[in-house]
Image (spheres, grey):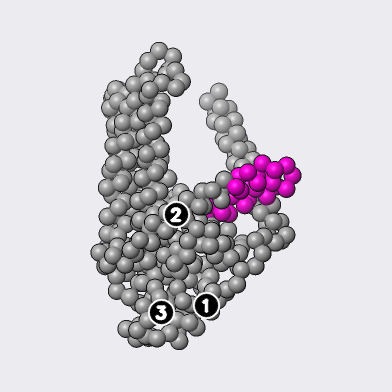
Amino acid sequence: MTIASRPRLQPLGLGELLDRTIRLYRRNFFTFLGILGMVYIPLSLLQIGLSYVNATQAAGQRVGLGGPPPFTPQYFTSLGINLFSGVLTVIFISGIATAVFTGAVADSYLGEPITIGGAYRRVGRKWLTLLGTLLVSAFVGAAIGIWWLIPCVGWLTGLGMLIYFQGIIIPLVASVVVLEGRSGTAALRRAWDLARTRFWWMVGFAAILGLFAQLVITGPILVLGAILGVVLSTLDVAPSAQTLALAQTIIGGLSGMVLGLLYTPIQLTAVSLVYFDLRVRSEGLDLTVRNADPAQPPAELLARAPAGGAGGLFTWREMLWFLLITAGIIAAYFVLLGIAAAIIFLAAAAFR
């Protein structure tokens, strides 16, 4: 490899970052799908089966007189299925797939050839470190939740702090763990120190990425569900509760699997490139890459590149920003509630 084969890193605007994300995604389309699909597809099929068992039990209970009583064996079975499915998602998607994919994106972005098998071999045991860090982040999230319960200061800042932690800090943690070799609270602190250098830009980026996910995944699944209902009513078909549960589970599960498989690489690639951009802006990573030994592997280069110093845990200005996020979320909630109430009122008036 030569230095010229590595990209010219530079600060990126939002449009440039999204453009590079799509270009990288298109250039490695089948490799990226293969890396993610190795874990994503078998897990999704298993979860579809678990969801069907859950849905048929719920449908059978609704057929009974007056609905199911609380705390039945079926209730605990459903609870266990949901818990088991969640644990599998954390281990295989948030842990293994995210760790492998993050390393592959970094290698491709820095000019290294990538393969599906090579990406899994190269990540080694870093996915275990990522899982451990995610476990630590769960305790940190619980601590923030306790902070939220504190009168006045907690009520005003806790919600904004929790949303920023879950929507921005945790996604960045994968890059810190895989590319820098940090773990636990050190990785969380490192992600926070990077994100705080562009606080509001990161808020806007996370909001755009979340909205895009809703449009790409949630929207089509809801549309397919509505189409299924219209088709059944048009054909005057009255399937049993179990048959309807099977159809909804399979259609919803398969469509969710396909859409998630296509979208998740975009999300993970974008977050990885944001990590690079933050380091370029705050730590001069572009100069480090430009002056690096051409034979130095990207993983070693990123781990040894100089990192910025850590400041205080929070500043008063950042606490004010968390307060503004909390106020914005509450305001948005009441606006949406008002819009929903207006739609219901207009619909009732129209059919009166």
Q: Residue at x 70, y 61 (%)?
A: 315
Q: Which residues are magenta?
A: 143-167
Whether residue 304 appears in this view of the structure is yes
Q: Tag 2 or tag 3, which sits nearer the N-term?
A: 3
Q: Position of residue 295 (x, y in %)?
A: 35, 84
Instruction: Give the SS element for disc 1.
Output: loop
Whether pointer 3 and pointer 2 mark residues with C-beta atoms closer than 8 Å, the reply is no
Q: In front of the other: label 3 or label 1?
A: 1
Q: Residue at x 39, y 70 (%)?
A: 106
Q: Tag 2 or tag 1, which sits nearer the N-term?
A: 2
> Type of residue at label 1?
Pro
**Residue 166 within the segment the image draws in magenta:** yes
Q: Position of residue 182 (x, y in %)?
A: 47, 65
Q: Residue at x 46, y 76 (%)?
A: 304
Magenta stretch, main secondary structure class: helix
Q: Which residue is mark 2?
A: 132
Q: Which residue is mark 3?
A: 7
Residue 224 sits in which quadrant?
A: top left
Distance from the alpha carbon under mark 3 to that under mark 1:
19 Å
Q: Which residue is mark 1?
A: 306
Q: Alpha-carbon neighbours of circle 1 within 10 Å: few (<14), some, or many (≥20)? A: few
Q: Position of residue 211 (x, y in %)?
A: 49, 52
Instruction: Give the SS element for disc 3.
Output: loop
> Type of residue at label 2?
Gly
